[in-house]
Image: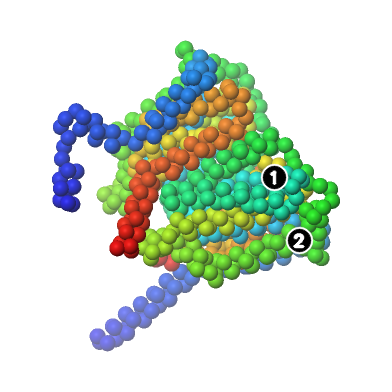
Amino acid sequence: MAKETLTEVITLAKSGSDQVAKKRSVLPWVADNGIFIFTALLIIFSAVFVNGFASLVNITDVFHRAAPIGIVAVGMTFVVISGNYLDLSVVAQVATSAVIFLAVSNQYGVPLAMLAALAAATVYALVNGIAVGYFKANAVIVTLATTYIGVGVLRFFSGGSIFFGPEDGPIRAFGTSKLGPVPYSALVLILVTIILAFVLSRTNFGFLVKSFGSNESATRLGGVNTGFVIVGAFFITALAAMIAGWVLAAFSNTAVSSMATGYDFQALAAIIVGGTSVFGGKGSVPRTLLGVVFVSVLTNILVLSNISFGYQQVALGVLIVIAVTVDALSRKAVKR
Amino acid sequence: MSETQSIQIGQRETTFLGKLRVTLARRTEGRGVVLLALILGVVSFTQPLVFTAYPVSLGRIALIGLVALGLTAVILMGELDLSVASTLAVSGVVMALIPDVRLGIIVALGAGLVIGVINAFFVAVVGINSFIATLGMLFALRGLAYILSDEAPVRLTNTDAGIAFGMPLLGPITPRVLIFILAFFALQIFVTRVKAGREFFAVGGNRQAAYDAGIPVKRRIFTGFIISGFVASLAGVINTLERTAADPRAGLTVLLASFAAAIIGGNYLKGGRGSIVGTLIGATALGVLQVALTLSGIQVPVQNIFIGVILLLAVTTDPANLRAVLGSIRSLRQGRAKAQS
């Protein structure tokens, strides 16, 4: 009798745990792998139903627009994984880099222009990184402040004027060259992704960024100079934003202080949709690239369908909220 | 050592100076007062027009202050509402689109309440960090404002009502300033005298302890976000009435200034410490600064450099932050000293 009840209890417990396991598995699985399916479905859907999507001209255009946003997004992945939400100041950083790049290269040549942009990126990384990493200030507020400071400084020195690059020269050549349907800027995106994926998954620094994101105090108690790790994460974001600025300047051959408006938001959408957790500690660079593909294709079909800018903003905002909700609920499910 | 410390903490100060010291240590407005004194000092020499044209300054303070007041309710609980700027824009556009002014105001304020409920739902029920949830709302609502307005400023149908609204009631007190003063006293009484408001501090200071003590934490989070959404839509309505038009791009400068006002006023971002009076002091400082910069002919993007720097300083010189920084420097030094010996 006693034995039978025991087996009964065990079977009950087993079936119960099976049910729990089933309940558990859906949302986390969607959070982890949903993006692969959604991206594939979206591309198939657009190719079949959206007029003009599957043309060579349009695909090149998608690459052109995705490249700078993608470069920003893969860089910003480091800040998100470190548990610091995001870097809003990429808007100012991309514009600063583009304006400095064109303005300086017109007079002093490209190498010096690159150095000047690098100096600006370093300043951004140090201010954001030190305020967040050493002063423990909130990253959203800090980068909100540096965005406005950066755009203001840029407007002050440029006077709000538009800078044009030379009609012929290395910059213009780079911006217009293509390898098949793939513009050089998209190749830069792939190169940056490979390098940053290596940094995040194969180096000590990448490991520390993840570790800080999942458990800040444990990382600190492990003897890690956590402030330095945060400065490093912001430095990688700043370098990526700098490269995005060059690519953007080369593509459009013009630079103005308001040119990167909305990049913060689109990059964040790509990162979160890709499956990097805003709660920190979880995520990868190639996933962000996938998120960039998703967001770019989505934006492209909205534009092709003549849907206005307002609806695009709403769509991206809702997308972010849905992705974060799935992430949050899947975390709750795992905890339970 | 620890014994004497605990006795000192338990001791009651009896002398006047001692009491003053304790009161000052409890207050959080220190940095706001310093900034206000600094700005008033500099402005009275460089741009005394700010004081002669005080109705303008009062109007500016009221606009920044109103949004900052709503933010304070949320910040006290350790949350943040980034969507206020878009709430302001959306409710302004909604109001301008409805021909009847009274109905427009009611619908616009209702929109603010709904936005507050949505924000609170994502934060309290779903469990998303409020920074991210309200950031998503910031962009989604901005898009909504563009859709509703067709990406262009919307004129108010009944411009007479707008003009009447801009007239001073008594001396320099325009309806906007009056609403700000009323909102200030209402919130001040709410967080210092009403049980629900007092509970904001508990929720912000230690959420688990508040929950264990029987405080309805989720309901308080709803209260806070509804207050900030409502107050932001109130600011949107006032803005639309005064300008007799609604701009879907409105609110971005206000966002920066109102955050700076609330944080420099001593509202600790992690929650639990802060005061409505501090927000008023912060808003006064930033309002005076903005008017002084505008009167000096400085463009808005360049003005934002000053406000951005203040926000950056406010968020890094938070007393709790500074204590953590000093602590880590001290432990680093001790570690070095031990390693050397």
Q: Which residue is mark 2?
A: A184
Give the vertical position of B142 relative to A273 (above or below).
Answer: above
Density class for disc 2 (Cα within 10 Å; few <14, some 14-19, many ≥20) is many
Looking at the picture, how far across and down is residue B16, in whole percent? 19, 28
The subunit letter for the residue under badge 2 reads A
- Tag on residue A99? 1
Q: Is residue B108 above or below residue B208?
A: above
Q: Position of residue A13 (x, y in %)?
A: 35, 77
Q: Secondary structure at mark 2?
A: helix
To the question of a shared chain for discs 2 and 1, the answer is yes
The residue most toward the front is B341
Say whether disc 2 or disc 1 marks the residue closer to the N-terminus: 1
Three-letter code for the amino acid on which mark 1 is drawn: Val
Q: Nearer the viewer, residue A251 or A126?
A: A126
A234 vs B23, left or right, is: right
Residue A240 appears left or right of B286: right
Q: Amino acid at mark 2?
A: Tyr
At 67% from the left and 41% from the top, the residue drawn is A257
Q: Which mark is residue B236?
A: none
| Residue at the (68%, 52%) spot, across then down | A114
Q: Is residue A269 visible?
A: no
